[in-house]
Amino acid sequence: MNTHKQQIVIGVPAERAARERRVALIPADIKKLIGSAAFIIESGAGRAAGFDDNAYVNAGARITASRDILENCDVVVKVRPPAVDETPRAGRILVSLGGHDPDLGERLRKQSVIHLALERIPRTTRAQAMDVLSSQASIAGYASVLEGARALGVLLPMLTTAAGTIKPAKMIALGAGVAGLQAIASARRLGAVVYGFDVRAAAREQVESLGARFVTVDGNIGAGDSVGGYAREQSSDQQSLLRRALAPHLAAMQLVITTAQIPGRPAPLLIDRETLRAMQAGSVIVDLAAETGGNCEVTRPDEMVTVGGVLVMGPTDLPSLMATDASRMFSGNIRALLAYLLNGSGRLNLDASDPISGALLAGQNLAHAPGVAA
Ligand code: NAD
């Protein structure tokens, strides 16, 4: 058993990015980890997600001011990447999102901060419990249907009333990965007639298993099969053929949720202005790829744009809207990661030859990192 003195100190600051209400670790998970590390939490860090300071104290953490965390922690755990004045000191370890931002990577390298970027968690069975991209995408898929449904002038379910019968709305998810499949399941629960499309052949069975119909396009246009579980990027000719093949399907839909992404690349353009012109006025597109350029030509992150009566939403903060459960899931992923790296030793075991910590380290310099067994 380690003494408190030997234990690594893990800090959780409050998130300061606009509209970010999640917290990286919740009290229940700290309680499970408390034997193998000490935790300090910035006062109010969990408040917006529904976890107050007292719950953290009861779980065994100490409440403190943010300066204290940056100065005294071996490891800082956050949701969003830190702004310059939120960056841990040199030699410390940062666990957060931000792995697709090369400028951030360069800044943290210059500041000698070891960044364990959560986007680099490998997509393996062993690492599944640590995969924040999946847990947060699942929430975004659910929330996208609620946001889209609220903006529609029509109902999703069929309704038979004394005033007449309302037909169910048609919904399609473009991209049937984690977010798209959750959007499909959520729209089905709300009673829409649901369709799905993806360039990965394996997605058909998953879409159909949720009771939705898979939209089929010419095999050569649609093919974009997997690299490590992700879709392969299509050529620009293939993309343009795919846009034309999808257009007539989209013209029949009232709600379109787009989730198509290629990791580290701009999102594929699936809906151009020509397709928008053919769509019904009053229909709604929720573009979950807004942060990486969008699947629709007119998408602007966190804005609503209307073209020819079609509303295009580009929300980038959907998991944060459901901050309590989004934090529970994010925190569960972080607990699994920390438990794996701590392995009861009181130190973070960052071993470049290990498939998970090796992927997270990706060539970083571990010299001078306290509490790290490199
Ligand atoms: P993602 O967010 O990178 O992309 C979303 C979806 O867009 C993917 O299904 C992708 O195929 C699709 N797409 C890309 N280009 C497209 C295009 N031009 N047209 C239509 N669709 C396009 O992917 P994701 O949701 O994170 O997951 C992708 C796959 O990986 C899924 O099958 C998922 O189940 C699997 N996965 C595996 C693990 C694991 O094994 N641990 C973890 C998470 C996800």
Image (spheres, rainbow, N blue to C red):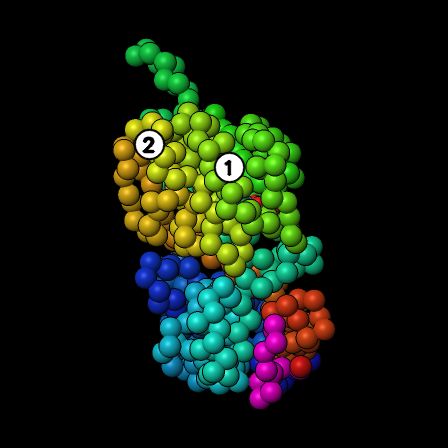
Looking at the rendered structure, which numbered label has been put on residue 242?
1
- Label 1 neighbourhood size at 10 Å, few (<14), some (14-19), many (20+)? many
As drawn, the residue found furthest toward the right would be 353
Query: Which of 89 and 222 lies nearest the eye of the viewer?
Result: 222
Q: In which quadrant is the C terminus drawn?
A: bottom right
Name above or below for residue 26 compared with residue 249.
Answer: below
> Could you tell me residue 94's position as x and y percent?
51, 74
Residue 115, can we see it? yes
> Could you tell me residue 117's position as x and y percent?
53, 68
Name above or below for residue 312 compared with residue 45.
Answer: above
Q: CA distance from mark 2 to mark 1?
A: 17 Å
Q: Amino acid at mark 2?
A: Arg
Magenta stretch, residue numbers = 361-373
Query: Which of 346 and 349 lies nearest the eye of the viewer?
Result: 349
Chain-order first, disc 2 or disc 1? 1
Q: Secondary structure at mark 1?
A: helix
Q: Amino acid at mark 1?
A: Leu
Name above or below for residue 194 compared with residue 162.
Answer: below
Q: Secondary structure at mark 2?
A: helix
Residue at (50% x, 37% y) in the render: 241
Residue at (60% x, 44% y) in the render: 224
> Could you tell me residue 295's position as x and y percent?
43, 45
Q: Is mark 1 within 8 Å of ligand 1?
A: yes
Name above or below for residue 67 compared with residue 213.
Answer: below
Query: Which of 242 and 98 lies nearest the eye of the viewer?
Result: 242
Q: In which quadrant is the N terminus drawn?
A: bottom right
Looking at the rendered structure, which numbered label has been put on residue 78?
none
Residue 269 falls in which quadrant of the image?
A: top left
User: Does the magenta portion include 297?
Assistant: no
Find disc 2 in the rendering and name its residue.
277
- The tally of labels here is 2
